[in-house]
Image (cartoon, rainbow, N blue to C red):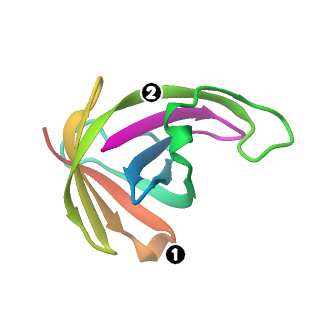
Amino acid sequence: MKFVIHEHFASRHHYDLRLEMEGVAKSWAVPKGMPLKKGEKRLAIQVEDHSLDYMVFEGEIPEGYYGAGRVLIWDKGEYELLKFTDKEIKVKLMGKKLNSVYVLLKFPKAGENAWLVILTGL
């Protein structure tokens, strides 16, 4: 299965993690980018699913449209799904920049769609 991480220069600069899953791109906005050190945690807000076509999108979303701004592919590749529940998703990303195991944990204290993304292993 494929993954992509977009760098998104919208009204607020952030990154978007997208995992190909169940025929869509499951998506999380990661305001401070993906963790790069083992044990590091970052907030990830789950957003609406995107079409798989969006996994290869790079370009400009025009003003007046949701997410207006420049979108760049920061990393992409394949991933292995190691665990999937409604509260935890564990994946091994095999990209050009990231080759690590990440876990997404539901984080209800921060909101209904809040998750933590944690780098657990290299």
Q: Is residue 13 magenta?
A: yes
Q: Which mark is residue 48?
A: none
Span highlighted in magenta in the image:
1-14
* Quarter of the image where one finds residue 93: top left
Residue depicted at 49% across the width and 27% down the height: 73
Quadrant including the N terminus: top left
Q: Nearer the viewer, mark 2 or mark 1?
A: 2
Disc 1 on helix, strand or loop?
A: loop
**Nearer to me, 108 or 65:** 65
Instruction: Give amino acid for label 1.
Output: Glu
**Residue at 27% across, 52% down:** 118
Mark nearer the N terminus (2 vs 1): 2
Residue 30 locus on image (x, y percent) = 48, 47
Left or right: where does residue 103 sit relative to residue 73?
left
- The tag on residue 74 is 2
Residue 71: image x %, image y %? 61, 30
Q: What's the CA distance linking mark 2 and mark 1?
A: 27 Å
- The amino acid on which the numbered mark 2 sits, given as a three-letter code, is Trp
